[in-house]
Image (cartoon, rainbow, N blue to C red):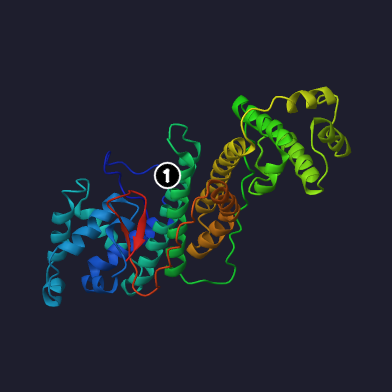
Amino acid sequence: MPFTSAPSEGTGLENTQPPAPVHYAEQALLGALLLEPARLDGLGSLAAEHFGDPAHSALYTAMRTAAVPGADEHRTAPVWLRRVLDAAQPQAPGLTASYLHSLVHRCPWPGHAAAYARMIEADYARRTLREHAERLAQAATDGSLPDPAATVLARCDALSGFLDTLSGRFAPHPGSLPRTPQPPPARPTVGWEAREEEQALLACATAQPARLRQMRWLQPDDFALPRHGQLFTCLTALVHRREPVDAVTVLWEAQHQHLLTADFTPADLLGLLTTPVGTPEHWGEKILRRALLAQAHTTAQYIQAFTDDAANTPHQLATGSRRALADLTARRTRWQHATHTPAPPRTPAVPRAGPRLRTTAASPVTRVWR
């Protein structure tokens, strides 16, 4: 019998999109369990929520709850199929006896049930990682949050914890880095608020240059406007050399750094530096917060690209995602220095023996292995 997609529960029609390979793994596993229900005892790490197809999830739940017939009874009557169908139909009304029979035919070999289960778990891990990345991206761009930096760091902690679990659950192998090309970073739109904050920082730092010695947590690449980052480099260079700092000396340094152009004249620079308001630390924290959120969004995009590439194994997903998190972790460390926020304790990776994925009640995305 040729492999075809399962009917949609809502319409009863064939799915228009070709099913992914994991769909066939789910069918093969369920077929194996319908043929040999005793193999349920060998799938202790698999849970119903790991299935991508809701009907398949309902069937697996039914298999876990229905009474398994004895070997003699199973050989002589289709009692097991009837029990499973009766238990699954309240959650999946579109299921039919003919579909269960088709699952039996779509199992190449019941003895490979454990291998099919590992495929399902691996795909579930990929989907869960993508959900973590999506929530990180959402937090990084949600302007309605009362404390977006704290929310982003919490999402980052949840993602890192899941990566620890993922690394402990799936064995490493050669070729651990994903081959997926990273998407080009989105060019941020520099709004008036970011521009004014960066100009205020440069003016305040020119008026109070000694305070820059305590602001090593701010770096030129944190600035949304590259020219402002270059001017900040001029300021820190003068402070490092212990030379006088004022608007004119910064102008002289900017000339040596090729920053003056027809579009940015000496008068423009002097006008930018001569109206200090506030303190460098105040404006520096705002600049670093914006850079932290932008880096979180870029990191989330990278991880989403990895999860969109079905060729990546769970180990490759974990390794590539950790690489993507490196720049965000560096900015996070500087943010903690700027705000005197203690670093959170690291959660140890879960041992590889006997873990299981489950969904916690507190969060629809955070999964843990048990």
**Residue shown at the point (43%, 49%) measured from the top left:** 154
Amino acid marked by disc 1: Gln
Q: Quadrant of residue 229?
A: top right
Q: Position of residue 56 (x, y in %)?
A: 28, 55
* 98 lies left or right of 133: left
Q: Position of residue 210 (x, y in %)?
A: 71, 43
Q: Quadrant of residue 113?
A: bottom left
Disc 1 residue crowd, few under 14, some 14–19, many 20+, Cα 10 Å: few
In the image, is residue 158 above or below residue 14? below
Helix, strand or loop under label 1: loop
Q: Nearer the viewer, residue 172 or 147?
A: 147
Task: Identify the residue under disc 1.
Answer: 17
Q: Position of residue 142 (x, y in %)?
A: 46, 35
**Residue 1 appears in the picture as rendered:** no
**Residue shown at the point (42%, 54%) measured from the top left:** 158
Count of picture labels: 1
Q: Quadrant of the C terminus?
A: bottom left
Residue lying at the far bottom of the rendered structure? 72
In the image, is residue 359 above or below residue 227? below
Q: Quadrant of residue 253?
A: top right
Q: Nearer the viewer, residue 248 or 315?
A: 248
Q: Position of residue 279 (x, y in %)?
A: 62, 34
